[in-house]
Image (cartoon, rainbow, N blue to C red):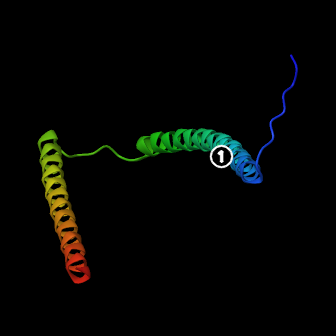
């Protein structure tokens, strides 16, 4: 195979060089992001292992504490009543959060609409 040469205009040459440099920059950026990803995954794995160890220690501590503490004297009915009370209060709190979130979103929409009216 015989090499062939083509003469390029200076504008074509500068355009080609610019595109080549841009593609090199994007490739280097991708490599850099990949390396950052690998290090963050290693760190995540290390942190998960540490968290698992801490949960194990916590479980041991809770088991020891359970052995030390006296038995509860609550009847099952009282425990059920407390659980139901907790569920009711949780539902009320969730409802309040949902309503406040909707109100704040509506307020934000109104502010945006007012800004749009001012611009027009």
**Count of numbered circles on the image:** 1
Is residue 78 found left or right of 6 in the rendered image? Answer: left
Please identify the quadrant where the N terminus is shown.
Answer: top right
Q: In this rendering, is residue 2 above or below 91?
A: above
Q: Which residue is mark 1?
A: 33
**Residue in the picture at 51% in, 44% down:** 58
Question: Residue 6 at what x, y percent from top left?
Answer: 80, 36
Kindly give the residue lying farthest to the top in the view shown. Answer: 1
Please identify the quadrant where the C terminus is shown.
Answer: bottom left
Is residue 117 found left or right of 13 in the rendered image? Answer: left
* Between 100 and 62, the one nearer to me in the picture: 100
Question: Residue 71 at what x, y percent from top left?
Answer: 31, 43
Kindly give the residue lying farthest to the bottom in the view shown. Answer: 118
**Residue in the picture at 45% in, 46% down:** 65
Question: Residue 40 at what x, y percent from top left?
Answer: 63, 45
**Residue in the picture at 23% in, 46% down:** 73
Residue 89 in which image quadrant: bottom left
* Between 104 and 49, the one nearer to me in the picture: 104
Question: Residue 103 at what x, y percent from top left?
Answer: 16, 68
Secondary structure type for disc 1: helix
**Within-10-Å neighbours for mark 1: few <14, some 14–19, many 20+:** few
């Amino acid at each position: 195979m015989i090499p062939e040469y083509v003469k390029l205009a200076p504008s074509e040459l500068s355009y080609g060089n610019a595109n080549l440099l841009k593609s090199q920059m994007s490739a280097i950026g991708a490599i850099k992001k990949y390396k950052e990803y690998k290090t963050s995954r290693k760190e995540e794995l290390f942190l998960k292992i540490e968290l698992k160890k801490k949960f194990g220690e916590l479980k041991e501590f809770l088991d020891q504490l359970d052995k030390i503490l006296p038995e509860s004297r609550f009847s099952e009915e009282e425990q059920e009543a407390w659980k139901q009370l907790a569920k009711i209060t949780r539902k009320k709190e969730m409802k309040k959060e949902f309503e406040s979130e909707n109100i704040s979103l509506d307020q934000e929409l109104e502010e945006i609409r007012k800004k749009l009216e001012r611009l027009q």
